Image (cartoon, grey):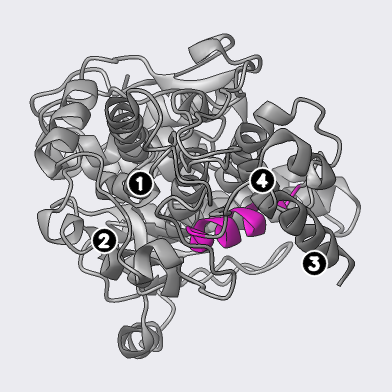
Amino acid sequence: MKQSAVILSALVAYATAEVPQEQSHRMFLTATQTLLQLNNRFNIVDPVFGLLGAAAAADGAGDVTNLDCLQQIVADEAFTNALALEDENERITGLANALLFRALEKNTGSVGLASVNCNEVANNPEIAAISQHQDPASENAQQINKDITLSLAVQLASVGADPTLALLAGTFTAGDPNDPTAAGNTCNVDTDAVGCIFTQNLIVADATVDEINQAVADAMGADAPQANEAMAENLDALASAMASGQISAVASDNGASKASASASNAGASASAAASGNLQAFSGNLGGAAPAVQNTGDDNRPFETNGVTFQNIGAAIQRSCAVQHNACANAANSGQIDASVSDCDAQEDECLAQANTKIKRGKSVKIRQNGALDFGSCSDPSIQFAEGLDGRKEAAFAPNNKGDFSQGSALNINIISSFICGRLRDSCKAGDATIQACEAGQAAAQGQQGQAAADAFNTALGV
């Protein structure tokens, strides 16, 4: 109740300056708040304060002192927290929500007044690459907002999200700067879970699907994820489906968002999972290996410990690795009467039983005539280094920016997932290469820093 009172007080005070609109994209405020609270280092009250002018923002900015940067800081923190999510769909959807929040228009004191841009550099280059929409009645707003939307589409695609979603960050039609009521053409309904700009059909699409696809292709190559025409023509339906969880933000092969587990397909998935645990290893030193289930998904049917894979070998390897890490942690802490070498031996047994031909600390190497077939691409290796994309901390990134044009990330799974997807969809690599890539992705998740990059690279023989 106290937090709600603070928010209400600030919004009432701000309403004396202009008719507010900060709740118009409410679904992104809600999603960003959920992410922010996973690790709220700056004690920010609510993301909504990032969409207010400096005076009103101060009431909910927590420890943030540069109020012109509050929106960016909220998005940056939410993005960082999303990177730590283990489930791929949740992670990509979280990253997309943080990016979309960063691009929303901020309130200003009058119709036609542009908001001040942040003068700091975000920690995450994906967030740093975009800025907020401007009042559509402000100078050159049409071109500015189009450029922001296209930049947003590129960043969404770079993290594995559907670039069509960039259109959801759009704003209203231009109001009259001479209107004494300062009403503009806005709405502001805090009880509309989706956002009144969508449900009242007030949003303006800043760019065409062709423009989005061209921008993404220019940045990522001709085979980059594509925007979906049907979804772009029905932004209200797209927003409602995303807000309700009927779809996730993840880009599918044809550029449309993937359907997530609804009531109907959840039952089908449960039925498939009930068919049995595909992890047959019974060793339980430090705990049993996580179950491997066939979810029935057409693209990545095998799941273990919240991560999905295209083939069963990679899933079982991941299961064995998770068991090994839990065992080693228990051995080091004295929770079990065993050594790490005992855990190593158990992992070897786990892998051997599955006949994956993987040894501890190594990844699958499936060769075709002595070398993996990367299709039309080359060198899918990952580097781990400091200073990538201006980051202060060491991060992961593809070595080959020509074929794998993905920015750096603190979580190797962002990079490895992108590379495996590109090998499969764009490079048209062989099946053995895809299997090796997914095995490398699984192996890397059990490591840190350079060891994670080495595990992935070893799998692909690079």
Instruction: State the CA–CA distance, disc 4 to disc 3.
Output: 21 Å
**308 relative to 414, above or below:** below
- What amino acid is found at the position of numbered circle 1 in the picture? Gly
Residue ID for mark 3: 4
- Mark 4 vs mark 1, foreground winner is 4
Q: What element carries label 1?
A: loop
Q: Where is residue 439 in the image (x, y as percent from the top left)?
A: 37, 44
Q: Mark 2 and mark 1 in contact? Answer it, CB < 8 Å.
A: yes
Residue ID for mark 2: 235
Residue ID for mark 4: 17
- What amino acid is found at the position of numbered circle 2 in the picture? Leu
Range of residues picked out in magenta: 24-39
Q: Residues within 10 Å of mark 3 (few under 14, many from 20)?
A: few
Q: Residue at image x 66%, y 33%?
A: 73
Q: Does the magenta stretch include residue 34?
A: yes
Instruction: State the CA–CA distance, disc 2 to disc 1.
Output: 10 Å
